[in-house]
Image (cartoon, helix red, strand yellow):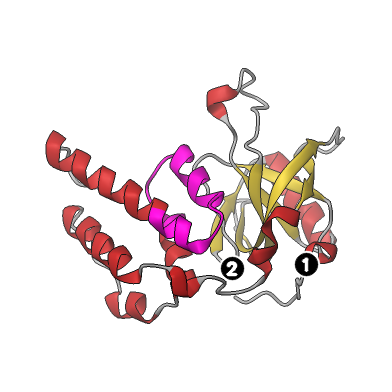
Amino acid sequence: MPIKADYHGPGDLPERIPVFPLPGALLLPRGQMPLNIFEPRYLAMVDDTLRDSHRLIGMIQPDLAHSSNADKPELFRVGCVGRITQFAEAGDGRYILELTGVVRFKVVEELAAITPYRQCRVDYAAFLDDFTARKGEDEVDRDTLLTVLREFLKANRLKVDWDGIERAPNEALVNALAMMSPYGPPEKQAMLEAPDLKTRAEILVAVTQMDLAKKRTSGDPPLQ
């Protein structure tokens, strides 16, 4: 679902946002992320967010490798803010959401909030290009990306809507493949922090090629 709000620059967004730390979760500008919310603190976060006209949640990964507090792990310094564009209540008390990515942010500081969920003051200035849809598409090596995707699908015995993939613009294709990729938090963070779409595609290709090479040499079974 498209966003029914216009974001032209940092001035259209709040500096203080709620954040949802989730390992392996990658949200990118104009990408769609489904979320299944069931923890009480995040149910409260959604309730508060829906009362706010912005309806924004910052998706960010916890930096578990450098955290000593499992209950409140350190956060990576870069995340992506998304707007709630779909919302439904499940009969068992869960919320089913879809976030649409708006722009990446850098964490300036975590705030001493009284809410059960975490909040941060953030800065969007380093990611002004995110406000321009399809920025840098012409620089993406689409042929290489699709070649590696074919190899990945074949190695893992997966099928996709190939016609849909071939019709997708480069930004939508690169970002969707990055978000859906089965790689770990470090790889996801590298793709998030890529300076442009071309670099993000190159990281995705390189990580996938390394994964395929590892499977060929180790005899690992395909993904289930």
Q: Which quarter of the figure is the N terminus placed in?
A: bottom right
Q: Which mark is residue 167?
A: none
The answer to whether residue 92 of the structure is visible from this angle is: yes
Residue 128 or residue 107, whichever sits in front: 128
Compared with 140, 70 (above or below) is above
Q: Nearer the viewer, mark 1 or mark 2?
A: 1
Q: Quadrant of residue 142?
A: bottom left
Q: Is residue 200 left or right of residue 42?
A: left
Residue occupying image coordinates x 34% and y 47%: 207
Q: Residue furthest front?
A: 139
Q: Secondary structure at mark 1?
A: loop
The answer to whether residue 223 of the structure is visible from this angle is: no
Which of marks 2 and 1 precedes in the sequence? 1
Q: Position of residue 116 (x, y in %)?
A: 78, 36
Q: Position of residue 9 (x, y in %)?
A: 77, 67
Report the magenta stretch's main SS: helix
Identity, as a three-letter code, of the amino acid under mark 2: Arg
Q: Position of residue 174 (x, y in %)?
A: 43, 64
Q: Which mark is residue 9?
A: 1
Please provide the residue range marked out in magenta: 178-202
User: Label 2 near label 1: C-beta < 8 Å?
Assistant: no
Compared with 182, 178 (above or below) is below
Disc 2 packing (10 Å; few <14; some 14–19; many ≥20): many
Reading the image, the residue beneath label 2 is: 30
Residue 222 or residue 217, whichever sits in front: 217
Residue occupying image coordinates x 28% and y 75%: 162
Compared with 211, 124 (above or below) is below
Distance between mark 1 and mark 2 Cα atoms: 15 Å
Disc 1 packing (10 Å; few <14; some 14–19; many ≥20): some
Identity, as a three-letter code, of the amino acid under mark 1: Gly
